[in-house]
Image: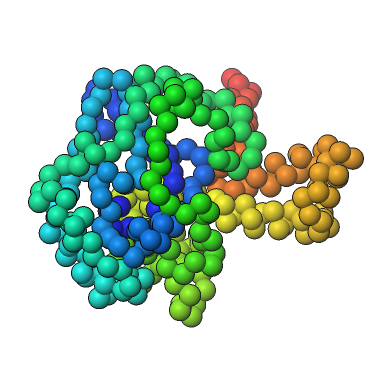
Amino acid sequence: MLIARVHHVMTIYQVRANGRPGQYRYKGNIVNIEQDITEIATRLPKTSSHLNIIIMQRQGVSGHSNFRVRRNKILNALRWLQVNNPYYRDIQIADEVLESLPIDGNISQDLHYIDEGGVSKEDIEDDDIVETAVPMQQQQRQQSVLEHAIQWPTGNSFPINEYRTEGYLSMAFSHLFPDGIADYTDFRRITKLLYSEWTKFLIEYHDHRYARDPRFRFHALNTMQRHESIMQSGVFAKKDDFTGNIEQLAAEYNRNHNIVNKLLCWASKIRGSAPYWYQRKLELQAMVSQLVFQHCSLL
């Protein structure tokens, strides 16, 4: 992330058992933010103290082992990207920032930490799925977080347009797309692909570099869900002959509250969403009930 030109805002949790790292999960929607053009977009790397990372951890836990930095590796990577990646050719290498980075050391002490005071079972497991739509951005924050607000590093106030910003994936994941090739937002591609096809190919890539990356796999999943939600919304509007704007949709809701049920029905078709898995749960329960009934009938 020290050499990324675009940063995505996302929340990732890692469940630990007996002090050992466990499975990852993410929460909410993912937004891609272009860094301030005067500070970041043309001058790299970033200083370790200005990384857009906030670590929320249990009280009493300190440090993190995944923030090793090697100065020469950073310099060589930037020089290589300048020559081989078309989206990095206009950057300037900030020598003074490089000098501030360790030759080979850990920068976890420069990051922002918030103590959550422990994670409850309710934060990890939710057998009763109550969400009825595509995952939305969380609007509420814990009071303890608000009381310990951290000044967010400088950045653009608006998310980038992931449909029109060419090469934004190469600028966000330069370690996965070092030469800018295979980026879904590479508009030079002659053959057009569905985002789901592109994601499936990368996740199944032979060396598993994309599947193993904790940030990319969640970014790809969330983006695919949002793309599918847009496509499903189009199907809904076409099937119901609804071509109006959001104000007309609100008026239709006031006239007929059942329109919400149709919207939720389409949300259940988005693979990976809460309604999708809730629908699979109901199907599984129905299958088990049928098998139990058949077994009892044979007795």
Residue drawn 64% across the image and 55% down it: 230
Indicate the quadrant where residue 109 lies. Answer: top left
Residue nearer the viewer, 155 or 119: 155
- Residue 142 seen in the figure: yes
Residue drawn 28% across the image and 25% down it: 17
Residue drawn 10% across the image and 51% down it: 103
Q: Indicate whether 21 appears above or below 18.
A: below
- Residue 298 seen in the figure: no
Residue nearer the viewer, 264 or 297: 264
Give the percent coordinates (x, y) of residue 27: 47, 38
In the picture provided, is 80 more to the left or to the right than 266? left
Quarter of the rendering occupied by the C terminus: top right
Q: Indicate whether 126 appears above or below 25.
A: above
Give the percent coordinates (x, y) of residue 80: 21, 70
Residue drawn 73% across the image and 44% down it: 263
Indicate the quadrant where residue 176 lies. Answer: bottom left
Q: How are the residues colored?
A: rainbow
In the picture provided, is 240 more to the left or to the right than 183? right
